[in-house]
Amino acid sequence: MSSSPVNLRATRSGSVFVSEGVEVRRDAAVKRQRHPWQTAASIVVLIVFLAVVYSFMTNERVEWPVIAKYIFAPAVFEGLRNTVVLTVAAMSLGLAIGVMIALMKMSSNLTLKAIAGFYQWFFRGTPLLVQLIFWFNLSVLYPKIALGIPWGPTFFEASTNQFITVWVAALIGLGLNEGAYVSEIIRSGLISVNKGQKEAAFALGMTPFLNFRRVIAPQALRVIVPPLGNQVISMLKATALVSVIALPELLYSVQLIYSQTFEIIPLLIVACLWYLVLTTILSIGQHFLERNYNRGYSDRGPRRVELEEGN
């Protein structure tokens, strides 16, 4: 029998859907279109993938016993803990800065908009590694940090080296850089909410805070959560950059070990495995957050199907 695509803009009539003169029962089976080349390509990709995995797993130079020895080593756990702490602290700082910069960028005040624009331009335009090294060496530019009234008395003064420790330099560098990216994510989420909904909420007598909490925020978060979740994962991996300023996070911890044992590849694999564990946990959390804020929305579009005549 011949078959032809059917537009499923059907009207409901009892247990039968009627569309352009073709009656289709509600329990009619959907016949998927077949793509033989797609199947063949999938088989080839699967074979290549399995070959690469087999080659890696059976390579003696990977030294799996060494990996098993150090995967739960106390020094590695200490670096893992520092990585998690730094990720949470830097992301919190970046989120706070990002919200502030986003509101400044959306302000009608030209001065605030210009400052926010300059902030985004500078921190998105310079490499994160350069920023970290700059903050770590801030004492070269400012040997002392003082707090007081300009051309007046000084209330507090301290050596920059005492104040800008490796932790402070890492936190400032990661947080300020992240704030520039988060600000655009926050701003895009806020402007995605239809202006008419805000006006309708005010017309119903809602206060600005209630309007934001009940109307704007739930819809904005649906747009904000996916890219923000990706930024958290990127932040986790970016903490490896602070190894250049000798902060004992995960990568620096394994570097200290393999600098003594010269077992470079096994220790790097240990670090990779722990990064994969952390990113997997974050990805699962992101998935559930997205599903929560996507309730009531569907990304499923119409699907093209073929129905055999006479069904």
Image: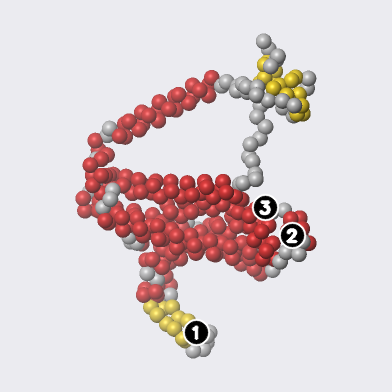
Spot occupied by residue 239 in the image (x, y as percentages of width and height): 41, 56
Q: Which residue is mark 1?
A: 148
Residue 195 lies, with reference to residue 267, above or below; the image says below
Q: Residue at x 43, y 72 (%)?
A: 141
Q: As shown in the figure, which amino acid type bears the numbered disc 1?
A: Gly
Q: Which residue is mark 3?
A: 192
Residues at circles 1 and 3 in contact by the CB criterion of under 8 Å:
no
Left/right placement of residue 101 relative to residue 93 reads: right
Q: Which residue is mark 2?
A: 201
Between tags 1 and 3, which lies in front?
3
Task: Tell me the CA gap for discs 1 and 3.
Answer: 43 Å
Q: Residue at x 51, y 89 (%)?
A: 152
Q: Residue at x 40, y 26 (%)?
A: 47
Residue 5 lies, with reference to residue 203, above or below; the image says above
Residue 148 lies, with reference to residue 78, above or below; the image says below
Which residue is at the front of the view, 63 or 145? 63
Residue 57 lies, with reference to residue 215, above or below; the image says above
Q: Quadrant of the C terminus?
A: top right
